Every structure is written in structure tokens, then in C-alpha cells.
Image (cartoon, rainbow, N blue to C red):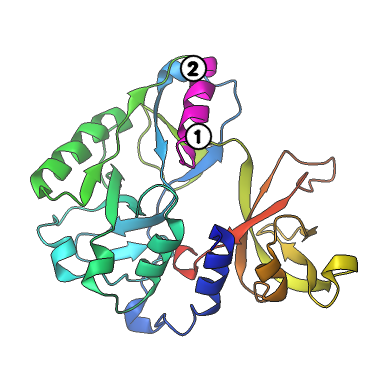
Amino acid sequence: MQRRDLLSRLSLGYLGCMVDTPSSAAQPPALWLANPYQGNENLPNYWVSEKYDGIRGYWDGHQLLSRSGKALNPPTWFVQGWPDSPFEGELWAGLGQFEQAASVIQQKQTADSAWHAMRIMVFDMPTSAKTFTERIHLYQDLVKHIGTPWVQAVTQSQATSHADLKALLHQTVQAGGEGLVLHRGSSMYQSVRNADVLKVKQHEDAEAKVVDHEAGQGKHAQRTGALWVETPQGLRFKLGTGLSDFQRENPPAVGQWVTYSYRGLTDKGVPRFASFVRIRPAVER
């Protein structure tokens, strides 16, 4: 079954699996957000790592939270021995296994066998008052101290030239990866979006909320032709490319958030060549 169809089926059954009660929700953790790579950065100032295609996880010292502050439900053994100090990483099921990671994480009760396929790829220490270069050593030491195979430290290497970075991006994507992350070595942890952290991908992507469905015509008659979506900034536009046959027959519901890819913006700020990628699991919002 194709990746997008799997995620659509997963998302259609999602609301029945999540428990959204006051006890399962917490204040969203104050985490950094990445800006897009522009190609004119002074690369020797940055570290580069793989961008894992999973669900961002934040350990607050007592429980595992999603980016939006939802309490996740890993088995006790998964978090056994984790420290009182916070750290963050990507809950990841392997290359090309985003749907599996989302399926495991979004459910209140999941078999232990499903969690055995999961890893958390640790990449930062949010409460440390040190530079990122220093925090690399901190999270590497933390992972060694935990000492379990499902807690792994994200590998960092020094960025060199833009040509080498593009070659590494191509190699990563060809192997099934999502992209790369650049992190300024001298930066302190900031829970804002800025140029200290950059995502490097073959296409830019963003999120928008579905606000309407447009009926299809021709070969798409009797099913959805396009989604009308709205960005967090209030911009509305039509998203028709990238939907599978299953998604046109079972489109994302109004109110759901989707990820789309695009190639720059028009003069009016509308994403060029926007294409549907997938429904974003609610645990990420």
C-alpha cells in the first residue's frame, strides 16, 4: 500500500485512538523551530545532521511529550533509566517508516512489540545554558549513560561547502532520508524560529489547515478535486496536486492539518507548485 494511502487510513481512524483530556495535555514545551536553508550561510559556523522523518519528542524529566504538549504513552521499559534533566529527539521507526512511527505514538495503548521498532534520536538539551557545540557532548554523554539501543545520539559533522552540503543532501534523500539540519555551533538554545537552526530539503514544506473541499471534474468527478487550505498566517489557497486516488475519495477532514511541499512563493506570497504531502498527526500540533 502506498505511503500516502496508509497515512490517510491511519488519520481517518485517529480521533478514536487519542484521549484528549486535561490529564493527557500539558503546556507545549518551548522548543526551537527551524528556518529554511537559503544557500548563502557561512557553513563553517554550522554543524550538519540528518533530519529524521518521525515525531518530535520532548522528555521533560518525568514524562514524554509531543511538540504540542500531549503526553505520550511509551511502555515503562522504554523510558526506564531516563534522567531528571530534559532532552529532545525524534521518535523514529527507520527510513521510510513515518506511518509506523505515527501509528505507534498516537495510540493510548500499543503493544510492546510495536515500541520495540521505535528509537528516539536525541539531538539537543533544551535547558542547558551552553552553546550547541557544547550541548552535542552533553547529549552524547546522556545517551551513553542511558545505555539502551533505542536511545541514540544524532551524529553531527562539520559543514564545509554548499556544494558538499547539496551532495550530502542528495545522498541522504536517495537513501530514503527526509533531509538535513544545520545548527549554528555558537548558538544558545532559543525557543523561537531563527537562523540558528536550518532545515535543508530538496523542496520547502509547510503546514496548513484544511478549510474546504472542491469537487473534482473529469476523471476526478464524484470525488475531491482539491483541498482549500489556510496557513497559520491566514493565507488561503488551493491544493490539488499530490492527492492519491484514496485521498480524493476519503479527503482530509475540514480542520485537519496537512503538510505540503512547494518551490518558492509568488509575488502575492502564494506557494508555487504546491503539492500535498500528507496529513500531519495531531500529536505534532
- Residue drawn at x 40%, y 43% is 190
Category of crowding for the residue at label 1, using alpha-carbon neighbours closer than 10 angstroms: few (below 14), some (14–19), many (at least 20): few
**Residues under labels 2 and 1: Cα distance?**
15 Å
- The span shown in magenta is 162-179
- Between 51 and 115, the one nearer to me in the picture: 115
Apparent side of residue 5 relative to residue 159 in the rendered image (left or right) = right
| Image quadrant assignment for residue 114 | bottom left
Q: From this viewpoint, which residue is outermost toward the right?
A: 218
Query: Residue 164 bears which disc, if any?
Result: 2
Q: Is residue 174 magenta?
A: yes
Amino acid on which disc 1 is placed: Gln
Residues tagged 2 and 1 counted as in contact (Cβ below 8 A): no
Q: Position of residue 204 (x, y in %)?
A: 63, 41
Query: Residue 174 bears which disc, if any?
Result: 1
Above or below, comparing residue 285 to residue 205 in the picture? below
Q: Is residue 232 magenta?
A: no
Above or below, comparing residue 85 to residue 136 in the picture? below
- Residue drawn at x 55%, y 39% is 35
| Image quadrant assignment for residue 273 | top right
Apparent side of residue 246 relative to residue 161 in the rendered image (left or right) = right
Q: What secondary structure is the magenta-colored segment mainly? A: helix
Of the numbered discs 2 and 1, the one sitting upstream in the chain is 2
Q: Position of residue 137 (x, y in %)?
A: 20, 32
Residue 5 in view of the camera:
yes
Q: Position of residue 277 (x, y in %)?
A: 62, 55
Local SS, label 1: helix
